[in-house]
Amino acid sequence: MASTRAAIRYAKAILDLANSKGVAEAVNNDMKSIASAIETNQELSTFIQNPTTTVEVKESALLEVFANVNGVTKGLFRLLFENKRFEILDAIALEYNKLFDENNGVEVAKVTTAIPMDAALEAKVLAKVATLSDKKITIENVVDPSIIGGFILRIGDNQYNASVANRLQVLKRELSN
């Protein structure tokens, strides 16, 4: 889901509040759970997006599904209830995670592979990434069979494409010239 300006504003406000209460990490974990749940559970996603479901029903359902979240996170549910903006919850959660990582000097390396990475490959990628960035790195693996093999590494604005699909594309261009 694309992040909206509203989602960024909510995320910043929630992060400021969480930092002031010393619970930013706990709320970050809540946001990871929420984003993951909405992403992997089509029913939950559809429920949150459904304009015919009342905000009261959405809020009580979210408080039930995420009963163990931090008070700040429950406060976000209340705010979204008051402003009737539950549909951007996913975007807010993702934006919060991004801001939290930025504030803590953590950079996300997005590694696209044709099949899920195993621990050995992840260790190799982390070792390579450590030479490219002085920040603390977390790896996010995206599986895309269309790259055939190899990997695509993206850190911030930099991208390194070592995919088989890319090599074939380069070869095709060279042959047609």
Image: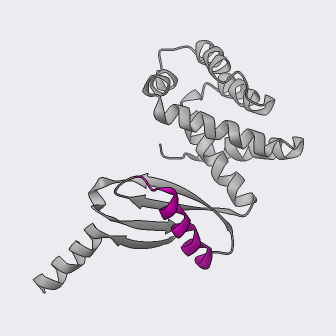
- Residue 104 placement, left or right of 131: right
Quadrant of the rendered structure where residue 175 is?
Answer: bottom left
**In x, y percent, where is residue 151?**
39, 66
| Residue 93 location (% of width, % of height) | 62, 40
The residue sitting at the front extreme is 120
Residue located at (73% from left, 32% from top): 73
Per the rendered image, the range of residues in magenta is 116-132
Location of the C terminus by quadrant is bottom left
Tell me, yes or no, if residue 156 can be seen here: no
- Magenta run includes residue 130: yes
Residue at 44% x, 24% y is: 46
- Most extreme residue toward the bottom is 177
When the figure is inspected, residue 113 is found, relative to residue 70, above or below; the finding is below
Query: Residue at (24%, 78%) from the top-left corner?
Result: 170
User: Magenta stretch: residue 99 in it?
Assistant: no
* Percent position of residue 156, x then y: 55, 67
Q: Is residue 124 left or right of residue 143?
A: right
The mark tally for this picture is 0
19 shown above or below 130? above
Residue located at (55% from left, 65% from top):
123
Q: Residue furthest left?
A: 176
Query: Tell me, what colour scheme is on the image?
Result: one colour
The one of 21 and 2 positioned closer to us in this rendering: 21
User: Does residue 118 lie above or below 74 as drawn?
Assistant: below
Q: Tell me if 41 is positioned left or right of 88 in this view.
A: left
State whether residue 151 appears in this view. Answer: yes
Write down the quadrant of residue 167 in the picture: bottom left
Horizontal and vertical percent position of residue 23: 83, 41
Secondary structure mostly taken by the magenta-highlighted segment of the chain: helix
